[in-house]
């Protein structure tokens, strides 16, 4: 049974079963052989598909590789300008995709091509997004520690237990990827966005490629980990407070306002009851500043609530899983 048959109840029309998105940067070394291996694995399945190669046009080697791959049947190359990174390239591919199911694959060896079919087959009525979980990956103790800390942070902030957020081989319904693109495509945190929106996510054990390349976040690069931490915190704020800004600003402004109010009240009481002079006390300036700062932060939250309320008619806070239609009973004569 083809993917089109399995997902014929999808709410969006599509002319293809599968859209494969590959985002590439760098010098293009080995890209042609890798994409050819992807194409061979997909053609053996017998489903209609397209492969979208989103690439950086700054490198001559990558441009040559893209021109070579453009001659392959089913391959479409896109060179967005300006190039702003792999995450935005994936989002651009999602906007161009025509398939009912989307599959993202990295432009470097990550998993064995035989595992691609397992990811696609995992997507169905009970699974909206299938994400790879690389097993038997060779990592140093320091790398394992950093990855464990990243996943612990994911459980702490989002309450989700995912064992491999760094694997970029994923397959899922098209609406899942489009929803993730609305939050700003972050490949590593795509499963978190899907889970927060109520989609069903399943991790699939996949064998790494013999010549697998470790992503930047798995290497000993502190800058990559800092960037991932900032992205994680920004995603946490977006998922939890985007539609309720007063909760975020109130949680910051209310304690500041309370500290300022209590300190001001204590200083005023000490002046009236104990006769303590306030003219040369920095505590009064500090208390008033804290009080005013807290009020301003809460006011920002109120403005955000007004904006959300004004645009709430254009926002949908739910997803339709399926539509059930029944036969209208015949009218009695």
Image: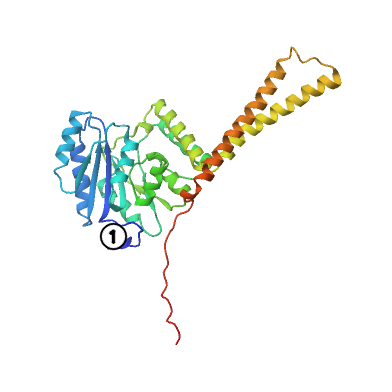
Q: Position of residue 175 (x, y in %)?
A: 37, 51
**The C terminus lies in quadrant:** bottom left
Extreme-top residue of the structure: 280
The image quadrant of residue 80 is top left
Residue drawn at x 81%, y 24% as measured from the top left: 269
Residue drawn at x 23%, y 52% as measured from the top left: 49
Q: Position of residue 293 (x, y in %)?
A: 62, 27
Q: Position of residue 151 (x, y in %)?
A: 46, 39
* 250 in relation to 118, above or below: above
Q: Position of residue 168 (x, y in %)?
A: 34, 41
Left or right: 21 as drawn, with respect to 231: left
Disc 1 secondary structure class: helix
Residue drawn at x 60%, y 34% as measured from the top left: 299
Residue drawn at x 52%, y 43% as measured from the top left: 308
Left or right: 7 as drawn, with respect to 31: right
**The N terminus lies in quadrant:** bottom left
Q: Which residue is the site of mark 1?
A: 4
* 243 in relation to 333, above or below: above
């Amino acid at each position: 049974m083809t993917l089109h048959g399995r997902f014929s109840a999808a709410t969006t029309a599509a002319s293809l079963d599968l859209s494969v998105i590959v985002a590439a940067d760098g010098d293009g070394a080995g890209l042609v052989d890798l994409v050819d291996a992807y194409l061979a694995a997909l053609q053996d399945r017998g489903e209609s598909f397209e492969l979208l190669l989103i690439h950086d046009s700054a490198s001559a080697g990558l441009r040559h590789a893209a021109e070579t791959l453009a001659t392959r049947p089913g391959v479409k190359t896109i060179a967005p300008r300006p190039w702003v990174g792999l995450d935005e390239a994936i989002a651009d591919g999602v906007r161009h995709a025509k398939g009912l199911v989307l599959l993202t694959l990295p432009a470097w060896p990550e998993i064995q091509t035989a595992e691609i079919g397992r990811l696609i087959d995992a997507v169905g009525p009970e699974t909206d997004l299938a994400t790879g979980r690389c097993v038997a990956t060779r990592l140093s103790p320091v790398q394992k520690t950093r990855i464990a800390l990243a996943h612990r942070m994911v459980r702490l902030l989002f309450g989700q237990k995912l064992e491999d957020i760094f694997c970029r081989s994923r397959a899922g319904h098209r609406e899942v990827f489009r929803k993730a693109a609305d939050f700003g495509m972050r490949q590593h945190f795509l499963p978190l966005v899907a889970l927060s929106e109520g989609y069903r996510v399943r991790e699939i054990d996949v064998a790494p490629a013999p010549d697998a390349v470790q992503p930047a976040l798995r290497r000993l690069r502190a800058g990559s980990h800092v960037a991932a931490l900032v992205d994680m915190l920004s995603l946490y704020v977006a998922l939890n407070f985007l539609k309720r800004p007063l909760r975020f600003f109130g949680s910051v402004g209310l304690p500041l306002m309370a500290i300022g109010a209590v300190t001001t009240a204590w200083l005023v009481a000490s002046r009236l009851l104990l006769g303590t002079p306030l003219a040369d006390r920095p505590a009064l300036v500090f208390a008033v500043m804290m009080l005013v700062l807290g009020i301003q932060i809460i006011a920002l939250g109120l403005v955000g609530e007004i904006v959300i309320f004004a645009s709430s008619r254009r926002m949908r806070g739910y997803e339709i899983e399926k539509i059930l239609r029944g036969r209208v009973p015949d009218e009695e004569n």
